[in-house]
Image (spheres, coloured by chain):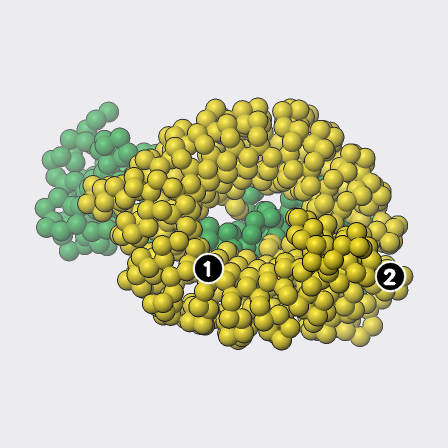
Chain colours: A green, B yellow
Amino acid sequence: MEGGGSDGSDLDNLKATELKLGLPGTGEQEKLPSILPRSSKRAILEANEGPSKRNSSEIKSVERDQKPAAKAQIVGWPPIQSYRKNSYQAMKMEAEPTGMYVKVSMDGVPYLRKIDLKVYKGYEELREALEDMFKCFSLGEISRMNESNGYEYAITYEDKDGDWMLVGDVPWEMFISSCKRMRIMKGDEARGLGSTP
Amino acid sequence: MTYFPEEVVERIFDFLATHRDRNAVSTVCKTWYRVERLSRRSVFVGNCYAVRPERVVARYPRLRSLTVKGKPHFADFNLVPHDWGGFALPWIEAAARGCPGLEELRLKRMIVFDESLELLARSFPNFKVLVLISCEGFSTDGLAAIATYCRVLRELDLQENEMEDRGPQWLSCFPDSCTSLVSLNFACLKGEVNAVSLERLVARCPNLRTLRLNRAVSVDTLSKILARAPHLVDLGTGSFTIDHRAEAYHKLINNFIKCKSLRSLSGFWDATPRCLPAVYPICGNLTGLNLSYAPAIQGADLIKLIRQCSKLQRLWVLDCIGDKGLAVVANTCKELQELRVFPSDVYGEGIAAVTEEGLVAVSSGCPKLISLLYFCHQMTNAALITVAKNCPQFTRFRLCILDPGKPDPVTNQPLDEGFGAIVQSCKDLRRLSLSGHLTDQVFLYIGMYAERLEMLSIAFAGDSDKGMVYVLNGCKNLRKLEIRDSPFGDAALLEDVGKYETMRSLWMSSCDVTLGGCKTLAAKMPRLNVEVINEMDESDELEENPSDLHRVEKMYVYRTVAGPRNDAPDFVWTL
């Protein structure tokens, strides 16, 4: 017995891996749990089926490494008291309510700024944001070290080990997880960094 | 026995400790029935719809302690609509009319309104104990009524309730003359309380032994309270964040040291590792520790703490304790009886914090372990077989593998053999929750071996009706069966309809039972309430004339002498 068309179920699986912010059981009616029991012959579907008898469709054997976000789709699973679940939600949200704020200093500027690294998707956006922030102070573009034309500044950051690194070398995710603070270096110091092979 | 005067018979009945025994003697003869009912002090109603409150009160007019449970267990996981039922008011009203001597009321999973609490407070002059677990519908106004009118209140115990906060005044409603408190637990309260009122209350109640604060109570207040009440036995801290260099920290440590009687600790909201040393002085005496709301305490800090708790009997932690941490528990906590490991990362995958290794370690190191709740990412048959061999004394075994339907990762086999070993080895097993990939085979084992089993929870398991039938046929002492997302249908449901009268209740959701099957069951068994819960609000078809072939999403069956209930909402059909 076949449930919906097999093409349809691929799309359904994809939809099911969509990250949703709500608690399971809230929000949309249509919830497809994509982690399905291996040999189960049933489709675990939510209500909008219509009056027809429930078809027990063939379940595709779901990959074990399916995206974990899909787990949130099964109502009432894992079986944790909603009281406890709500407490954990509240604690999680409070733990990171304001994202990843780091201080940014710029040489010669009397005060520092703070930016939320989580807001940016990558180095480009970060650079633009910094340029914008320090517009009134900078004499030129805050550019990448690798540019061959003249530059006035270099963006550096202090990592977990306390070392000052040049921004841009490592993947973005790695950067934001190890960056403790940033410093926009100018002039000679910057050039000194640039000349390292 | 009938030649003894009734007073003597009554004294003999006093020795009967359990409800079951008392229920049994009441059926022997009319005299015994009368003696028993007039001397009965305590009644337990496992399902509030199994009997009418008026009936209970009429039969036991000298009742002093009443316990009533409402919603089915799966309501804890949002599977039961909020307004399904389970109202406390009819019980309180009936008791107010018929048992004015009531002293204790314990309610679980019921809807309790402020009006009900107010009626309660005003109706029973001797009222001493109120315990509300997983209830909802009331606010701090209701608590204010309790505090104001219950002159001899001993216990106010609020566990995991969803209650509305209408301000901190309620605590100040305890009159100055109230000095009788022995136990006060408001950990689930979300709002603030007046610190001064709290300290004063604690100071004037010399018999206070249990105090569980909520998150809004600061460490400073906690310190002052400990100073006033060093005789506390059970403490739930409030917010446990302190700067470890501050004076407040040193005061706290000193006050903890004075608490020689402290045996149980919980709370630890917002606790960070820095604050933990404050409790080191009393760790050696602890028999109970609940760190399941302290996600910031992990790894090495957690281990360091546990190493000092050699007398622990009850431990609740998050899975960030890791297998390593559980090995430390196994080495240190030789008195451990109950272990609960909760998942810290509920929706994401995160790091597989605990696996079968941790469980095996604890099973081999803790010879007194009898109760387990274990959330993990994976489990193997080999591990379960080892655990079964190490711990044949389990009475409660609840295993939740977070990925539903996940097989043994080593052999790719279902976990039938593992759970089979558990039920075969643990002859006293009363409660069992299954998870992982399971076929009908595991139910065959359960039916064969789990003779003492009273409660069974099944999710995403089984292949066919045979599975459920094995359980219904085999488990003679089964009282509660709850099943979700498993392929059991009408044939299984109707195999032995008489069985359900020997049980408290049956819950089936997202299974293959049809409306027709439910109707058949209801027709055959008039003393069962067969409730079909339909939450589908967009489907008009159901309201008109749903076909008998239509699959039922949620079904709740329970035995009752009260007939169909009269307070069911529209979406609940009693067939």
Task: Check disc 2 and report its element: helix, strand or loop.
Answer: loop
Instruction: Identify the image quadrant of the C terminus of chain B.
Output: bottom right
Residue A124, position as x, y percentages in the image = 33, 46
User: Chain under label 2?
Assistant: B
Residue B47, position as x, y percentages in the image = 69, 60
Q: Amino acid at mark 1?
A: Arg
Report if residue A120 is visible in the image: no
Q: At 33% across and 67% down in the image, what residue appears?
A: B176
Question: Is the residue under label 1 in contact with that under label 2 (CB below 8 Å)?
Answer: no
Q: Is residue B473 left or right of residue B504?
A: right
Query: Which residue is at the front of the view, B201 or B242?
Result: B201
Q: Is residue B261 above or below residue A135?
A: above
Q: Is residue B533 left or right of residue B365?
A: right
Q: Nearer the viewer, mark 2 or mark 1?
A: 1
Residue denoted by label 2: B525
Q: At 63% across and 58% down in the image, what residue appears?
A: B42
Q: Residues within 10 Å of mark 2 (few under 14, many from 20)?
A: some
Q: Which of the 4 image quarters holds residue B402?
A: top right
Q: Which mark is residue A126?
A: none
Residue B504, position as x, y percentages in the image = 74, 55
Q: Which mark is residue B154?
A: 1
Q: Residues within 10 Å of mark 1 (few under 14, many from 20)?
A: many
Report if residue B290 is visible in the image: yes
Query: Both on one chain, marks 2 and 1?
Result: yes
Q: Is residue A134 left or right of residue B134?
A: left
Query: Which residue is at the front of the view, A45 or B189?
Result: B189
**Distance between mark 2 and mark 1 Cα atoms:** 44 Å
Q: Is residue A197 above or below residue B1?
A: above
Q: At 54% across and 40% down in the image, what residue appears?
A: B340
Q: Earlier in the sequence, mark 2 or mark 1?
A: 1
Query: Which residue is at the front of the view, A144 or B124?
Result: B124
